[in-house]
Amino acid sequence: MTEPASLRSRQPRFRGLEAGHRACQGCGEALAARLVTESAGPDVILTNATGCLEVFTTPWPQSAWRVPWLHSLFENSAAIASGVEAALKAQGRRTKVIAMGGDGGTFDIGFQALSGMLERMHNVLYVCYDNEAYMNTGIQRSSSTPHAAMTTTSPPGKNRMGKRHMKKDLLSIIAAHHVPYAASASVAYPQDLRRKVRRAMEIEGPTFLLVHSPCPLGWGHDGTLSIEIARLGVQTGLFPLIELERGEVASVMPIRNPVPVVEYLKRQGRFRHLFSDGDHRAREEREHLQALADYNIERYGLKGDGDDPLDTDGADTVRRGGPART
Amino acid sequence: MLEALEGSQAIARAVALCRPGVVAAYPITPQTHIVENLSKLVADGRLETELVSVESEFSAASVALGASAAGSRAYTASSSQGILLMAEVLFNISGMRLPVVLTCANRALGAPINIWNDHADSMAVRDCGWIQLHCANNQEAVDTSIQAFRIAEATELPVMVCVDGFVLTHTLETLEMPDQKLVDAYLPPFRFSRMLDPKHPLSLGTLVGPEYFAETRQAHHRALLDSVGAILEADRAWQAATGRSCGGLLTVEGPEDARIGVLAMGSLVSTFEEAMEVLPGRKKAKLIKLRAFRPFPDEALRHVCEGLTDLVVVDRAISTGFGGVLGGEVRSALLEMKKAPKVHNVALGLGGRDVPMEMWPRLLAVPKEVEGFRILDLDPAKLEPADL
């Protein structure tokens, strides 16, 4: 008799991103990119903003990509994707274009090109791997960095408690473009992520996916804890998983048991300064972050009214990656 | 058939004759009429192309990059600040060896802001790895625009067609527009050897470390040097098809035994040609029209400078703190001559200052007046004495 695990390993599965690339252990972005390309299938053309993903997958003369892939600059992934898509249209080809970038290349420097791509209604799925800082250059704050997080350009000190500003609410800005489909996802919920990619792939027009992707180096946690921490990001309400259609919230992943944000914060070095004894500022910032999570739960109605097989506990099929939370 | 057309309109129609798959457009004076005319051709059903009206010049160049990599003939146009905003992408397009064609409606760079013609914009991206061809009149602008696609696709190098803003783009001239059949025969459909295609997945724009980087630069340099052949071939084939030549890399006119030469690019050449013909009491001089600025045709230049005692190089841009850009390059090219003419470098017509025909006799007096570099048409009354 064949074991289920062996059946699974023999199941043909398309790999857009091959193993053997040079990402760090526990890299959330590498996992997310593998899941995205796996779900999208072989008939795609990828564009990639400058960043870790570009660097660790294509050190000449090697490449980890099994699908056509184009990198140009930091801030033009959406614009070169627009050009690729226009060319495919001109040639009558049906191949789907997926543009990719990190949060720096999406929230910040590539923001204008992204807005232009969405406004012009290009048939492109844009995927932002959100690890909440400029990791490739060595952990600098971006507009996606959470409030109070430590980076090398938002260090805590006598006069500062990490990043002073809030994480940019990018999804709401995407929603204001009234695109057919936009969603957030997390590497801790691969089934949900796959479903969202497939959903976006079927839509003719601009779609957007924001994937929460832990960076062990930048967030200050062991590589084995990436999934665990990403899961807590969702279960605390700090990173809500939602779907938007034409700018309106269409569905959310309910939180079965909201977890206090300190459970998320205390596992990461980037929030270490929020736990220094006797610092009233640390307590205030922890309360501030809890209030932000509570606001998300309230705003998106994340608190389910009963157990749901697809809520944040039920949908979680990944139990590898670190000790279970106690 | 001869038609009276505005430069921009003629350039737009020439581009349309080349059947671009993707056109990326963003407005900037004085290039605007080109993208307006292309948009109208699309709206009227006279041009089948994916017209992408982008949100910046940066994205215009990026769209052209993506479209070219995906195997479509791609075109865009800009000027001045727009060229600078594109600069990062321009280096990328050439580094990836993508055959994009761009019209640069040459305009000054700010500050102070100035919308009129000089060559500061294309000179600022001199080292971006593109072929740069300058047009002396609107017929050349039409013909060079079409040749540009043939050159780009033969060499897998992008081509920048430089036309003087306003002087050419906004001027009506009687022009010969080629017909579609002729252009189709001259310019076969674009087939890109490294097209993005799921059936043959390639990674384009990968990270290249110190072990390979110098070699990529050498290959690019070699390709630009060798593109001389493609530029000459494209012009010869065009002449065979239409009877018109744009002058290959450079041309020289004037009496054989002239000892003074004047070298210029762009519409100034037409002004000086006219002056040579009509102004009375003219001195003997040769006029060298430089068409190819990149690749820089140093060998051809040395050849036409044989026998000259003085060469006046007319720049329409200034590298502040150095002098004329063209002047510097000509000087270094002529160093290898046994009996090189003395180079006198002047700048003229900066920021759209009019250069009338009457400037020609003054230029011929330059060898006695100018050592090194000088802006020739300055008005000292408008300057502080310390700035002179």
Image (spheres, coloured by chain):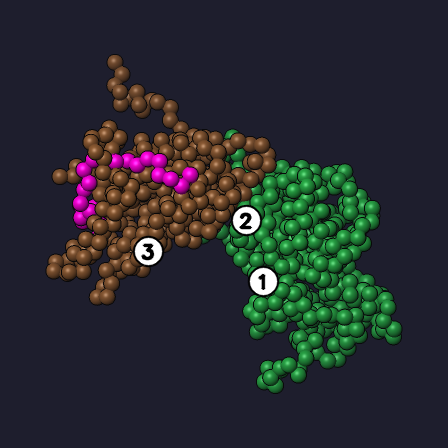
Chain colours: A brown, B green
Pointer 2 residue: B54
Q: Is residue B3 visible?
A: yes
Which chain does the numbered disc 2 sit on?
B
Which chain does the numbered disc 3 sit on?
A
Pointer 3 residue: A141
Residue B94 relative to residue B38: left or right: left
Q: Secondary structure at mark 2?
A: loop
Rounded to the nearest angstrom, the CA distance separating label 2 from label 3 is: 29 Å
Q: Quick one: which residue is furthest to the top in this view?
A: A1
The amino acid pointed to by label 2 is Val
| Of callouts 2 and 1, the N-terminal one | 2
Q: Quick one: which residue is furthest to the right in this view?
A: B280
Pointer 1 residue: B124
Residue shown at 35%/32% (left/top)? A194
Magenta residues (range): A246-269
Residue A64 in the image: x percent, y percent? 41, 38
Which quadrant of the rendered structure holds the C terminus of chain B?
A: bottom right
The amino acid pointed to by label 1 is Ala
Q: Secondary structure at mark 1?
A: helix
The amino acid pointed to by label 3 is Arg
Point out the frontmost of discs 2 and 1: 2
Q: Are marks 1 and 3 on the same chain?
A: no
Q: Is residue B207 visible?
A: no
| A7 versus A54 height, above or below | above
Which chain does the numbered disc 1 sit on?
B
